[in-house]
């Protein structure tokens, strides 16, 4: 294996590892779910991508047949990460809007802007307009955790 | 193996599988055709099993290498006297139950009765024929999953509740099965039962602790299927709650446990196993005696006829396993005879009880007097005979079976316990059935009133099937000579594991290649 | 006919490529299978994708992909920096509303996906009329400028790709 | 001939049941003809027997058990068979006229013949096991006979009690006879009877004796097992007459006589048998005196006479045995006559109550005369047969010393005789003499000859034997006594007058005292009833009454319906037994070197343990535990990856997600949390069991992993490629070496899906249907059903996933993958459509019949296996070859792949069937229908009009 | 610290968790427990072939050491069977809950609601 | 120099990913909301994918990539299902 290839692979691996770590670090330390979402969806994806590309280079560089599966994995992750994030965000908006497991750091009820044209967000119709439900109103609506 | 015999062995497995699949594919919405096919298949299975039994009675153990991979590497099917006998018993029972289900219309009460039934037969036949311990697990699962479906056939709250218990406990049992199989493989490096016998016999002393643990865990699993106390909890509820045809078929299910205990106990942990020889017997015997007592006391405590039938299964398993657990050739023959008897008797009782319950309307099978019902004379006769069969009074095979067992265990040091338990519990059984029959038939005769149920599907058909099973008990008694000759020979074969090993692994037993 | 046989031609091309990547060998046999599956699989699965988006695979699309890839990498460094250095209370999180002129579900999805994959933003929801996206920004100084940037950088390009 | 004789009544038992169609006469005629034929057969054999030859017949039945259908007819058997058939015939005649039109006569005679056959079997059996069969058959058939009048509670109870006591005794007899047979080395009676020394010397003699005597005493109603007999009187009178004079109860005495040669003569025999007999004789006679029911009186008198007989056989001398034999005969004649007489009284006067009877002699002179003679014989008044045997008994008693006390036997025997005189006379006097009454329930008059004829025949015998004992009974009695005692009894000349002996004085005393007792009967009666003696029947009732609830408490206590109890029992037993087995034999720890764990492995371990702990800690929050459990599956798949098991990893990953989807689908309708129910001690117990199980399984794993393995697997490595045509050895094992496992496995999967289908197809009916209809969501729901981004993305993912599945399938034989994983990937991809676009949308477009998928999957796998048979190879034998085509190059085709297609189809079918069914359940519960659009999305910006989102009712 | 120790202790932990959960009185935790037991037993069976790193069971003439493929095949069968069984039991639990109104399986009579 | 960088880089990457797994685990346990936990599982799965890839490089084998590919697909499905449950209760409707 050429030194260049080795350095390239090593660099990609180090970078990938670091991004993965940073993404998870963000997950661990950021204050609210909406902010935490940023870390994993971006940094981690790129981190994995780094490792995958390193791997893609590694095999031909070390004389083994070239493998493209890594590319597929990368594509797949890029394809699905936004959807996952979107679904998590939706679930979060929904639950926060109904104050099912309120988290003060995500002040959605007071802080959510409205879409232009008088409608509302698909997930979250009108929750901001409703007065906060009293605790008595909550019980029939179940917390799941 | 002679090609005709090998064809029959394969047919005993593939026919139910193919018919089950065809039932799903083509016959799902054609009840009449399904019924004809099912009955014909059961009849064919009886013929196949009879031919195999005839062949096995010659005394050779036949081994069939599936996929043409020889033992111990591939999976082999092994036909010996015991497995052939179990096949025949299963087939006969299945035929009776299937006819009963059809004539009484039980098969229309839910979905997929016929495919489930065929898959159940596949599982049973597979379990009896396989010579591979892990494959035995697989066929246990096949027969269990089919039995779950059949048990719940028709549904209703009681059946569902009992079903949950039955399913969950058996799932845990399956887990334990894997612990046992895995451990044996981990120590001996093989799964073929004949090879296991060789490996266990040759195991270094340092491995024996693990092998013993595996053996006992497997014993617990098989004892669970055999409803040995304290592993019996699932049975009374499940058998009492399900439909009669299914409960009757399930009379064979506990025997699968007994079969496995016998097979592994004589082959893998048999005489040659050194310090591990027959190590499970001392654990099983007290449990079997307590099972007998609990079973018959349960019979006495029952509030419904179906419960009685269910407890009678427990009791008979206790009797059977008492004889098995002394692990003596002279007691094993009687035990095998009792397998035949108790299976058919249990099934007969379930069917008779169902016939009664169907005719009593609202009262069903409750142990209380009610208005007269149609065919009560006839049914009282059938009930009387079924009770005689279950309890073990002459002239049916139960009495012969118990005599055989009492005679067979006499040389065992624990004979006194076994004798006392069997004789006393028989009395309890007599009392219980006398009370039940007196309430259901005699006391009811004093109550005037219109028969609660007049028109009934399969009025005579059901009676004929139940009567047929009872006639089988009589035949089993009348033909006691040839039957015991066979069962004794089967027992002798079991206690000569080398013959099995030779048949499966070749003459130089266990040599690779 | 072509439409019948190739309900999603671009998809077929993609699938051929995917198959070649999967089997990882450039032989006629593999290509034959790839073509076969590339035609067959969309045929079978097209029932689940009834409408077909009109996409122009040209320089605009290529440029878009390149920009996005570049932005993803840059975005990651930015985010990493924020995560590592910014104190929580200094975060300037904002909800952004991004009205869009895009009118196909596929296009809006691509836009939303792009937003999620690029600097400091996560597409969180769509308005009930489908004309605006709700985006959460991790740390922006000027929300209005950020909205404008997104519209200008991605939406205008996408409008050319999806017509 | 002997077989014919023994089987005739049993085989002929059906005749009356069939003949009843032709009327009552035909019915009785059928029964009578059967009995008469048997009697004829017996008569033809009698001369040979009386000539001293034992008639035998034997066919092997169950040689392995030593149970042979061996019969023999010796004088003892001849006498009993004669009584059984002769009295049986009389009973049949009598019953024809006794039973009312309402009684089902066919059934009656069927039962009677069954009983007769069973009795004959007992006395003819030359094999103790055969004898036991007949013994228990008498218990069963007598149960039916006693309970014949099923509408009467007394009859039902009496029948059950008789069955309980005699049946139970029979079980003891089984034990005793089996021991006896084992000492003797044969179950053939003729062999056993030659083994006196061996038997009496055996340490098992006493247990055998006790068990046998238990059988005899219960059957013969010896104290304290006598109580069933009086209650058996609820039977129709012909039954009582038959059972309690000559047959059923005599079976016990017969056994004593039969086994006399080998059992008698020991101290134990004498003390137990003679004492029991004596006590029974006196006690029962005393009770009989105060019974007001005619049949009750006769019942206790029967018990008393059975005690009499038992005592005689118990004394153990040949002479006493001879007297016993003689009295068996005598008792049968007069007692049967008296029972039949009681039946006549009941039949004609409408009551059997002595207090309501009297003065009937003038109204019923024939019956009165017969009763007078039979009664006097029972009282032991000369010149009737009862007198002779009683005299001989007193003679024997006078010579018997009991525990060094010479007076005990003579005094008590005389007392018994006294009481016998008293109750016999009471029967005669209180029924037939004294003032005539005008309050009989029915106007009494003599019955037809059908009813008085049979007792008259018996009374004739009573008189004949009394007057000419040596002529009428002598040869038989001597022959029988010889048979009973194995020839020890010297033949005696039976005579009415024995001269002036102590016995004569005892007899005279008895008669005198008996008359005196009867004269004071009223006073004594009051005393007797005032004493409040314990009633054995009441004790029995109480025992039964406590037994039932007690057994219920026991069973309900054990079987409380708790799954957890069953589970603790199962797991606890497995753990305990497994450990015990492990510790009971040698174990050496292994010495295999381990693999150092990488830090990543440790981290994964931490993740696994943490997630597991979280599931256990938060399992009550069900949704949350489903999130945690995902991590467990993830880490395990990762471990499989790390530990060289890629196929396992792929399978685990795909199974995991489907399982979680299933659980989420189910959780939608289930409660979302688990209440805290178990108490701390219970949690502690469960924790202890859990830890023990964990230590057991984990410890076993550790013990195995640290020792070397010599396994059959080398073979797979060597043959996978050359013989199985694949390089992925795991896959070759699955589809080839152990294809049969896989075949079973897909059937399990398919059947599971069928079961699920069957379970859920009916969910809309009954209670569950009502619950679903009333169901309201218990979580707050967002109004959006099918988010746009998700719908769009999954449409792209589906074809990609299918490609991946195809790839995984095709490479499976050589690389990780295969039909199962491919099937799951396809299923997951389709599921994604279901989740994103909704059930209706996806199901419409799927257009697949899941049942057929399963069916054809199994079929393809089976047919692939069967294909080998066509080529003469065993089932499931695989074939493969490499082909080459222009352009495409070389490729492999293997039957294993076909098998794998079967696997894949089954998997897809099963998973889809299960999930489709589950989804439909939720559909049923749903009140609002999701918007149905062509594109499935709730919000589709491509639509011309801005979509108005559905409003959420729940808010 | 060896892999063997990690795996054995993981098996122990999974088994213990599974057993504890199946001893709870409601169907849902019982099902969770069954899932854990299935994890545990899969690992256990797998471990019976001993642990080997970086020797996937792909036939290669050049390779000298192999992993034991047989337990892997057994585990695959066990996973599939357990999957079928779990699916069935989940549905059975649901069906029983819908029919009886309770998911309680500890033998208590209370907790049932009328539909 | 050649031959020593790569092992070091691999070790570093492994350490980072391992640490990342621990951090995700922390979020999983800590919550506080279901969304946090779903996100943690999602991240953890992606971390594991990375781990598998790095292992593949370290052991110079491509055999395990299918596992990573499948994991990516399945993580997506699981996340969607968890979220849909929170949103609607019924994940297929
Ligand atoms: Na983003
Ligand atoms: Na997962």
Image: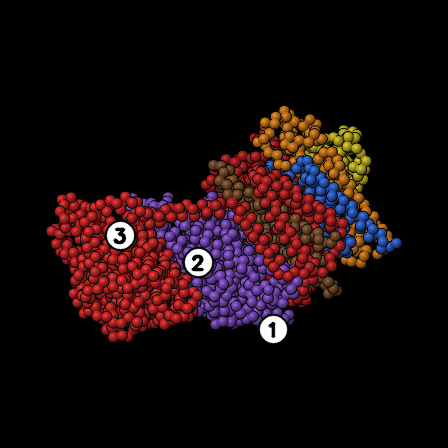
Is there any visible trace of residue B237 in the rendered image?
Answer: yes
Q: Which chain can be seen in yellow? A: C
Which circle marks residue D286 in the picture? 3
Please report the residue visible at 49 percent of the width from the left and 45 percent of the height from the top.
Answer: D561
Q: Quadrant of the C terminus of chain B?
A: bottom right
From the image, state the color of chain F: blue
- Of labels 3 and 1, the one closer to you: 3
Chain of the residue displaying label 2: B
Question: Residue B44, position in %: x, y?
Answer: 45, 63
User: Would you call the spot at circle 1 few (<14 residues within 10 Å), some (14-19), or many (20 or more)?
Assistant: few
Q: Which chain can be seen in brown? A: E
Q: Which chain can be seen in purple? A: B
Instruction: Kindly indicate the quadrant of the structure image that contains residue A67.
Output: bottom right
Q: Is residue D319 left or right of residue B342?
A: left
Is there any visible trace of residue D105 in the rendered image?
Answer: no
Q: Is residue D109 left or right of residue B474?
A: left
Instruction: Kindly indicate the quadrant of the structure image that contains residue C32.
Output: bottom right
Please report the residue visible at 49 percent of the width from the left and 63 percent of the height from the top.
Answer: B413
The residue at which mark 1 appears reads as B508
User: Would you call the spot at circle 2 few (<14 residues within 10 Å), some (14-19), or many (20 or more)?
Assistant: some
Question: Residue B218, position in %: x, y?
Answer: 57, 58
Assign a secondary structure to mark 1: loop
Q: CA distance from mark 3 to mark 2?
A: 36 Å
Mark 3 CB within 8 Å of ligand 2: no
Q: CA distance from mark 3 to mark 1?
A: 80 Å
Question: Residue B479, position in %: x, y?
Answer: 39, 67
From the image, state the color of chain A: orange
Question: Residue A113, position in %: x, y?
Answer: 70, 28
The residue at which mark 2 appears reads as B420
């Amino acid at each position: 294996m050429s030194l260049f290839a080795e350095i390239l692979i090593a660099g990609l691996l180090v970078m990938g590892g670091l991004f993965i770590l940073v993404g998870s670090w963000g997950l661990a330390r950021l204050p609210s779910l909406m902010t935490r979402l940023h870390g994993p969806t971006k940094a981690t994806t790129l981190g994995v991508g780094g490792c995958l590309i390193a791997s893609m280079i590694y095999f031909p560089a070390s004389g083994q047949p070239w493998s493209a599966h890594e590319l597929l994995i990368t594509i797949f992750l890029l394809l699905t990460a936004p959807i996952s994030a979107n679904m998590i965000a939706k679930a979060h908006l929904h639950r926060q809007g109904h104050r099912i497991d309120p988290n003060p750091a995500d002040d959605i009820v007071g802080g959510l802007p409205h879409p232009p044209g008088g409608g509302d967000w698909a997930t979250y119709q009108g929750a901001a307009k409703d007065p906060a439900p009293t605790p008595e109103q909550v019980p029939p609506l179940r917390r799941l955790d | 193996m002679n090609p005709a015999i090998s064809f029959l062995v394969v047919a005993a497995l593939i026919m139910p599988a193919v018919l089950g699949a065809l039932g799903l594919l083509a016959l799902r919405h054609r009840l009449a055709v399904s019924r004809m096919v099912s009955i014909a298949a059961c009849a064919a299975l009886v013929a196949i099993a009879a031919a195999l039994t005839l062949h096995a009675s010659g005394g050779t153990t036949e081994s069939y290498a599936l996929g043409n991979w020889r033992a111990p590497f591939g999976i082999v099917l092994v036909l010996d006297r015991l497995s052939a006998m179990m096949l025949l018993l299963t087939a006969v029972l299945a035929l009776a139950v299937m006819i009963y289900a059809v004539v009484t219309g039980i098969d229309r009460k839910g979905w997929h009765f016929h495919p489930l039934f065929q898959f159940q037969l596949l599982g049973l036949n597979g379990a009896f024929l396989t010579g591979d311990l892990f494959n035995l697990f697989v066929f246990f699962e096949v027969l269990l999953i089919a039995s779950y479906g059949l048990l719940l056939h028709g549904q209703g709250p009681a059946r569902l509740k009992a079903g949950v218990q039955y399913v969950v406990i058996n799932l845990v049992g399956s887990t334990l099965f894997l612990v046992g199989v895995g451990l044996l493989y981990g120590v001996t490096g093989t799964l073929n039962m004949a090879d296991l016998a060789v490996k266990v016999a040759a195991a270094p002393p340092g491995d024996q602790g693990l092998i013993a643990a595996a053996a006992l865990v497997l014993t617990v699993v098989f004892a669970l299927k055999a409803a040995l106390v304290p592993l019996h909890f699932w049975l009374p509820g499940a058998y009492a709650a399900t439909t009669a045809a299914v409960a009757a078929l399930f009379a064979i299910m506990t025997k699968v446990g007994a079969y496995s205990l016998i097979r592994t106990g004589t082959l893998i942990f048999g005489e040659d196993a050194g310090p591990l020889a027959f190590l499970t017997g001392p654990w099983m015997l007290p449990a079997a005696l307590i099972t007998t007592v609990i079973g018959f006391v349960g019979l006495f405590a029952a509030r419904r006829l179906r419960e009685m039938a269910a407890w009678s299964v427990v009791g008979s398993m206790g009797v059977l396993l008492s004889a098995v657990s002394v692990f003596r050739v002279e007691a094993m023959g009687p035990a095998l005879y009792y397998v035949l008897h108790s299976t058919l008797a249990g099934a007969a009782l379930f069917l008779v009880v169902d016939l009664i319950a169907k005719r009593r309307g609202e009262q069903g099978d409750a142990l209380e007097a009610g208005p007269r019902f149609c065919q009560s004379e006839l049914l009282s006769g059938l009930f009387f005979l079924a009770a005689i069969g279950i309890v073990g009074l002459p002239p049916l095979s139960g009495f012969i079976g118990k005599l055989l067992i009492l005679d067979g265990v006499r040389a065992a040091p624990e004979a006194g316990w076994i004798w006392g338990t069997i004789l006393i519990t028989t009395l309890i059984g007599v009392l219980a059935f006398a009370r039940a029959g007196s309430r259901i038939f005699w006391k009811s005769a004093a109550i005037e009133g219109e028969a609660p149920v007049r028109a009934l599907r399969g009025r005579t058909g059901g009676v004929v099937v139940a009567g047929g099973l009872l006639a089988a008990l009589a035949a089993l008694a009348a033909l006691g000579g040839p039957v015991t000759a066979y069962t004794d020979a089967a027992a002798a074969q079991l206690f000569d594991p080398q013959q099995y090993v030779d048949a499966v692994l070749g003459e130089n037993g266990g040599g690779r290649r | 006919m072509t439409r019948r046989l190739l309900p999603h031609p671009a998809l077929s091309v993609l699938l051929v490529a995917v198959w070649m990547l999967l089997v990882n060998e450039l032989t006629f046999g593999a290509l034959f299978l790839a073509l076969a599956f590339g035609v067959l699989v969309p045929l079978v699965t097209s029932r689940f994708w009834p409408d077909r988006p009109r996409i122009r695979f040209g320089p605009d699309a290529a440029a878009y992909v390149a920009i996005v890839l570049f932005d993803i990498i840059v975005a990651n460094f930015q985010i990493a920096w924020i995560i590592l250095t910014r104190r929580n209370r200094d975060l300037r999180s904002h909800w952004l509303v991004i009205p869009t002129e895009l009118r196909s579900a596929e296009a809006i999805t691509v836009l939303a996906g792009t937003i999620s994959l690029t600097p400091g933003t996560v597409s969180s929801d769509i308005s009930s009329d489908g004309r605006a996206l709700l985006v959460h920004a991790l740390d922006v100084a000027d929300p209005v400028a950020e909205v404008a940037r997104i519209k200008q950088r991605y939406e205008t390009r996408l409008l050319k790709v999806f017509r | 001939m002997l077989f014919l004789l023994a089987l005739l009544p049993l085989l002929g038992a059906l005749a009356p049941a069939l003949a009843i169609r032709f009327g009552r006469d035909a019915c009785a005629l059928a029964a009578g003809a059967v009995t008469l034929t048997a009697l004829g057969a017996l008569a033809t054999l009698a001369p040979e027997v009386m000539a001293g030859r034992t008639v035998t017949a034997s066919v092997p039945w169950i040689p392995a058990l030593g149970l042979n259908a061996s019969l023999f007819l010796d004088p003892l058997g001849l006498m009993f068979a004669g009584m059984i058939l002769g009295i049986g015939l009389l009973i049949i005649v009598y019953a024809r006229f006794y039973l009312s039109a309402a009684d089902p006569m066919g059934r009656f005679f069927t039962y009677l013949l069954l009983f007769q056959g069973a009795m004959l079997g007992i006395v003819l059996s030359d094999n103790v096991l055969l004898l036991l069969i007949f013994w228990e058959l008498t218990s069963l058939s007598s149960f039916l006979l006693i309970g014949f009048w099923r509408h009467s509670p007394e009859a039902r109870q009496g029948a059950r009690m008789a069955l309980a006591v005699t049946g139970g005794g029979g079980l003891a007899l089984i034990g005793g006879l089996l021991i006896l047979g084992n000492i003797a080395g044969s179950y053939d009676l003729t062999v056993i009877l030659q083994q006196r020394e061996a038997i009496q010397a055996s340490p098992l003699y006493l247990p055998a004796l006790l068990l046998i005597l238990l059988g005899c005493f219960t059957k013969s109603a010896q104290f304290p097992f006598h109580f069933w007999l009086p209650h058996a009187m609820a039977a129709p009178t012909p039954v009582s007459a038959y059972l309690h004079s000559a047959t059923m109860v005599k079976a016990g005495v017969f056994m004593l006589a039969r086994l006399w040669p080998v059992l008698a003569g020991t101290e134990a025999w004498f003390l137990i048998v003679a004492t029991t007999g004596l006590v029974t004789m006196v006690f029962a006679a005393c009770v009989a005196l105060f019974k007001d029911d005619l049949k009750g009186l006769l019942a206790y008198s029967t018990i008393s006479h059975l005690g009499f007989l038992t005592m005689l056989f118990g004394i153990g001398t040949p002479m006493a045995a001879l007297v016993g034999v003689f009295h068996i005969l005598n008792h049968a004649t007069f007692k049967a006559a008296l029972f039949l007489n009681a039946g006549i009284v009941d039949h004609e006067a409408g009551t059997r109550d002595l207090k309501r009877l009297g003065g009937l002699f003038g109204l019923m002179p024939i019956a009165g005369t017969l009763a007078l003679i039979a009664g006097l014989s029972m009282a032991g008044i000369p010149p009737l047969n009862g007198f002779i045997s009683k005299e001989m008994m007193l003679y024997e008693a006078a010579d018997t010393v009991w525990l060094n006390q010479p007076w005990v036997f003579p005094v008590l025997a005389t007392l018994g005789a006294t009481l016998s005189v008293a109750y016999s006379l009471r029967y005669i006097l209180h029924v037939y003499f004294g003032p005539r009454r005008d309050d009989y329930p029915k106007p009494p008059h003599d019955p037809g000859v059908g009813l008085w004829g049979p007792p008259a025949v018996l009374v004739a015998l009573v008189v004949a034997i009394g007057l000419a004992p040596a002529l009428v009974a002598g040869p038989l009695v001597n022959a029988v006594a010889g048979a009973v005692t194995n020839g020890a009894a010297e033949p005696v000349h039976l005579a009415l007058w024995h001269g002036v002996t102590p016995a004569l004085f005892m007899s005279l005393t008895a008669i005198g005292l008996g008359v005196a007792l009867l004269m004071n009967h009223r006073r004594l009666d009051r005393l007797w009833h005032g004493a409040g003696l314990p009633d054995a029947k009441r004790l029995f009732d109480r025992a039964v009454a406590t037994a039932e609830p007690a057994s219920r408490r026991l069973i309900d206590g054990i079987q409380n319906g708790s799954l957890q109890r069953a589970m603790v029992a199962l797991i606890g037993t497995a753990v305990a037994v497994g450990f015990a087995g492990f510790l009971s034999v040698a174990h050496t720890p292994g010495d295999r070197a381990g693999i150092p764990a990488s830090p990543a492995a440790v981290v994964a371990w931490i993740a696994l343990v943490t997630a597991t702990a979280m599931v256990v800690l938060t399992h009550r929050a069900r949704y949350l535990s489903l999130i945690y459990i995902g991590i467990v599956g993830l880490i395990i798949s990762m471990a499989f990856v790390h530990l060289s098991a890629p196929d396992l990893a792929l399978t685990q990953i795909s199974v995991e997600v489907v399982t979680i989807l299933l659980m989420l689908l189910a959780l939608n309708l289930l409660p979302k949390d688990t209440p805290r129910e178990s108490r701390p001690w219970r949690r502690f117990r469960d924790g202890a069991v859990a830890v023990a199980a964990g230590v057991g399984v984990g410890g076993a794993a550790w013990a195995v992993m640290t020792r070397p393995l010599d396994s059959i697997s080398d073979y797979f490595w060597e043959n996978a490629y050359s013989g199985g045509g694949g390089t992925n050895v795991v896959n070759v094992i699955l589809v080839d070496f152990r294809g049969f496992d896989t075949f079973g496995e897909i059937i399990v999967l398919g059947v599971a899906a069928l079961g699920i289908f069957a379970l859920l197809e009916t969910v809309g009916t009954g209670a569950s249907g009502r619950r679903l209809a009333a169901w309201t969501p218990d979580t707050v729901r967002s109004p959006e059903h099918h988010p746009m981004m998700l719908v769009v993305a999954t449409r792209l993912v589906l074809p990609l996933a299918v490609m991946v599945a195809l790839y995984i399938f095709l490479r499976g034989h050589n690389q990780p993958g295969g039909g199962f994983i491919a099937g799951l990937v396809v299923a997951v991809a389709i599921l994604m459509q279901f989740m994103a676009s909704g059930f209706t949308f996806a199901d419409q477009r799927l257009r697949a019949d899941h049942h057929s998928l399963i069916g054809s999957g199994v079929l393809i796998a089976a047919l692939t296996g069967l294909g080998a048979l066509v080529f003469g190879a065993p089932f499931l034998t695989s074939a493969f070859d490499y082909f080459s085509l222009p352009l495409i190059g070389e490729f492999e085709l293997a039957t294993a792949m076909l098998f794998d297609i079967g696997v894949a189809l089954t998997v897809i079918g099963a998973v889809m069937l299960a999930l489709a069914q589950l989804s439909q359940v939720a559909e049923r519960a749903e009140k609002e229908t999701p918007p149905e659009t062509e594109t499935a999305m709730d919000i589709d910006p491509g639509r011309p009009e801005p979509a108005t989102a559905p409003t959420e009712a729940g808010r | 610290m060896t892999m063997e120790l990690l795996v054995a202790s993981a098996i122990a932990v999974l088994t213990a968790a599974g057993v504890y959960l199946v001893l709870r009185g409601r169907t849902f935790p019982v099902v969770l427990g069954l899932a854990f037991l299935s994890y545990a037993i899969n690992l256990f069976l797998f471990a019976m072939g001993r642990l080997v790193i970086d020797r996937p069971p792909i036939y290669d003439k050049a390779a000298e050491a192999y992993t034991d493929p047989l337990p892997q095949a057994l585990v695959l069968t066990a996973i599939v069977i357990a999957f079928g069984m779990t699916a069935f039991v989940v549905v059975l639990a649901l069906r029983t809950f819908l029919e009886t109104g309770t998911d309680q399986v500890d033998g208590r009579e209370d907790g049932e609601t009328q539909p | 120099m050649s031959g020593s960088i790569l092992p070091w880089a691999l070790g570093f990457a492994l350490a980072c990913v391992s640490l990342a797994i621990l951090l995700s685990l922390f979020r999983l346990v800590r919550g506080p909301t279901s969304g946090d936990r779903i996100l943690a599982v999602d991240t953890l799965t992606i971390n594991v994918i990375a781990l598998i890839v790095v292992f593949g490089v370290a052991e110079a084998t491509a055999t395990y990539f299918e596992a990573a590919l499948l994991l990516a697909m399945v993580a997506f499905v699981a996340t969607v299902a968890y979220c849909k449950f929170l949103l609607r209760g019924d994940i297929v409707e």
